[in-house]
Amino acid sequence: MGYKVQRNTYQLTFKGTEFDGLEVRIRGLNTGQMLELEAARLAREAGGETGVGATRQMTEMLASALVSWNAEDEDTGLPIPPTLEGLLAQDASFNAVLIDQWTKAMVGVPAPLPPASSDGQPSLEASIPMDVPSPSRTS
């Protein structure tokens, strides 16, 4: 029996931002999808018709990976479905922040980093004297 590779799921939080309180659970992408996302991001930055298509592609990728969120409609207070339709009904800047945080979660170093290990013996280099030796008396 082989090892079953599992795709990561990330918990995005937005503490200290204008989206404080939003919690998003989202799956990671495989390497091919990450390359597509990066190509779409670059196309979006280039603008024009290519940029519009790229924005749509990125939003579709986001929707396909979205597992759950606690987003509610501002007017009705009803939950917004974590679907492509739910994303398309949001401000573009909202989706851009989601994509940015999602990308950071997939490629970034998780924080906080674990503390340095205190186990083991001190290195031998630490025990080598570093003082300048006194001049030789034989010269």
Image (cartoon, rainbow, N blue to C red):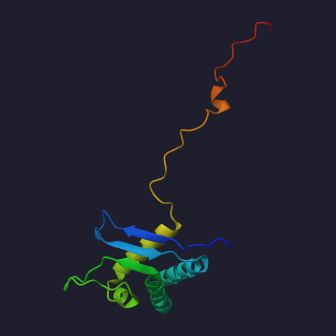
Q: Is 60 drawn above or below residue 97 in the view shown?
A: below
Give percent across and percent down for residue 31: 60, 76
Of all residues, the one furthest to the front in this rendering is 1
* 61 or 7: nearer the viewer: 7
Give percent across and percent down for residue 40: 52, 83
Residue drawn 35% across the image and 79% down it: 93
Of all residues, the one furthest to the top in this rendering is 137
Q: Is 31 drawn above or below residue 136 in the view shown?
A: below
Give percent across and percent down for residue 35: 58, 78
Which quadrant is home to the C terminus? top right
Residue drawn 37% across the image and 84% down it: 82
Give percent across and percent down for residue 106: 51, 69
Q: Is 117 drawn above or below residue 99 in the view shown?
A: above
Residue drawn 45% across the image and 73% down it: 102
* 17 or 29: nearer the viewer: 29
Which quadrant is home to the N terminus? bottom right
